[in-house]
Amino acid sequence: MSSAKNVSLPALLKTNPSFDCSESKEVTRGPRAWVRMPFQAETIAPGAVEVRGQNNGLTTMQVHAVLDDGTILSSSFSEQQVIESWQPKGRYGLTVPGTEHPEIRSRIEQVYVTIDNPPALNSVMSTELASKKKWDDLKLPISVMFAILCGMAIMPLLYNLFFYGALRYSFMLWHSMMIAATVAYTFSSSGLIFIAFPETSLITKMLLNHWTLAIGFAASGFFLVRFVEQGKIAPWLQTVILASAMLPVFVTAFVMQFDGGYNDHARAYYHASFLPAFFLVLYVMVHALRRGSKAIWFQVAGWTPIILFGLDRVARGMDLYVGWTVLDYGLYFALVMETIILALGVAHRILRLRQQNESILRKQVELTLLADTDGLTMMNNRRSFEREFARNLHDHRYSHLAIIDIDFFKQVNDRYGHEIGDEVLRVVGRELEATRHFAARIGGEEFTLLLKVDSRDNRKKFPANTLTEICETLIRAVHDRVPEIQEPVTFSVGVAAIARRASLRSVMATADRRLYDAKNNGRNQVVWIDISEASPSKPTGTASI
């Protein structure tokens, strides 16, 4: 029942009050709520007895013990004293006066508790009597358990932050925010906050509980959209997910305007705001699985227990029923297990993304090679040759350009067949690739060489002698590796120097003109200067092979 704040217990008893034991919200309508509990000494362990209940948002309280002769023993507690009496899992423990003395304890018949400005029905209905020694002994191990749970959740947070610097996947940040909110919620709602910050008010604690849960819930929506593979969640559904995930944040900001956010209606609105996302996530899991998502299995494993415990928490938060507070421990364990499961999911997703990226890079390399490689000889093609020449305008690594043409190659194809001709091209390509110069096939039986700048001691015989040696090597290689050809396969070469600002077209034109001179001058030779007309003797600027 409820009353005005100035009503004392003797005055209340004179009115022969009727206590409502149902789960009606009417018991919290007044500024002071009253709870009456029969004192059954034989059901509680010997020693001091305490009143236990949820401490969220509480202010001042009183505990009264009524003896068998009508004597009333009373204790008043300020908000700070209620805070100091905290117990794990957001509860308080206030000693019932007289229970420290066995002779008085045995005479207690009724215990009355007053709660000033109770924030919700649950604050009244969760009140119970329990052994003080039992819960004092459990305070340390339960606190240690919650501290361990926080520590277990923090490890994936450090893992995410460490790898995000290198990988830059956005879902890692959202998962980190989820973990941070989970740790903050567990730290606050479990009561560990009073160990680190003893001056924290119960209202601050309750605000922190509300906001951390709402923020973590919102982050989970963004995480879900970013984490699941592309195309596995329909675009319209992604928008609905984000909207439903943000709903608790907006509702929390709104309901805090009503009496500090602690009246029955505000509390009901807050808890109800989680319901759309709960049911939507269940649908999304089925939706993504049907589309073949692998990543969604981690959400199924991590979030299904949270949704089940969360539905219970929402029902109790909306005061639909009182329920069992032991389920709160299940929610804490589910939250921590979800953090660990999703950390494994993040690691798995990173591995899959890395494999996909490596596959894409391999394909890009393959496509680049195909674009820059001659399909028959597997050496550089004209495209890569032109790019290398352009690069040489800045690097100046090459001093001459040579065009090498296989003499009478059409006769080789006509006499021995195209397979033999192709093998000749492959042999020539391999030998040119083995030199220290840049080699490319630019079409048909024509090849190019970009000759690297030689040392000062060899410049007198460079490039003619160098190309002569290369052509001799080519002739021997074709003779040894293509034995089907009876006669020697020779080569004609035109050479042009690469001036610093010369264009590819001008240098190629010069080399091609000199190749033409080599052909007209009897083939099987290297020409490195212009020849106006062939003379009976070997012209200057030619070298026979």
Image (cartoon, rainbow, N blue to C red):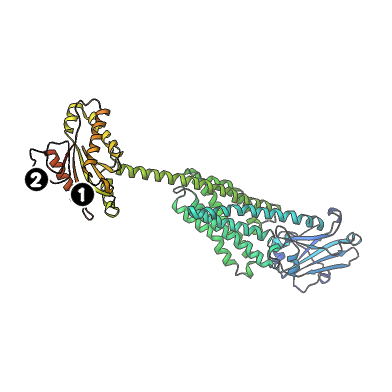
| 354, above or below 173, in the image | above
Nearer to us in this view, 364 or 98 = 364
| 481, above or below 152, in the image | above
Question: For the view shown, which residue lies furthest in the bottom direction?
Answer: 6
x, y percent for residue 378: 30, 38
> Disc 1 designates what residue?
497
x, y percent for residue 136: 79, 57
Screen quadrant of the C terminus: top left
Residue type of the residue flagged with mark 1 = Ala
Screen quadrant of the N terminus: bottom right
Which numbered disc, 2 or 1, marks the residue that appears first in the sequence? 1
Q: Quadrant of the rendered structure where residue 495 is?
A: top left
Q: CA distance from mark 2 to mark 1?
A: 18 Å
Crowdedness of circle 2 by 10 Å Cα count: few (<14), some, many (20+)? few
Residue 348 circle label: none
User: Looking at the image, can residue 503 be seen?
Assistant: yes
Q: Helix or strand or loop: what does disc 2 sit on? A: loop
Number of marks present in the image shown: 2
x, y percent for residue 461: 22, 44
Q: Quadrant of the rendered structure where residue 31 is?
A: bottom right
User: Looking at the image, can residue 312 be seen?
Assistant: no
Determine the residue positioned at 84% across, 54% down: 45
x, y percent for residue 88: 72, 58
> Disc 2 designates what residue?
532
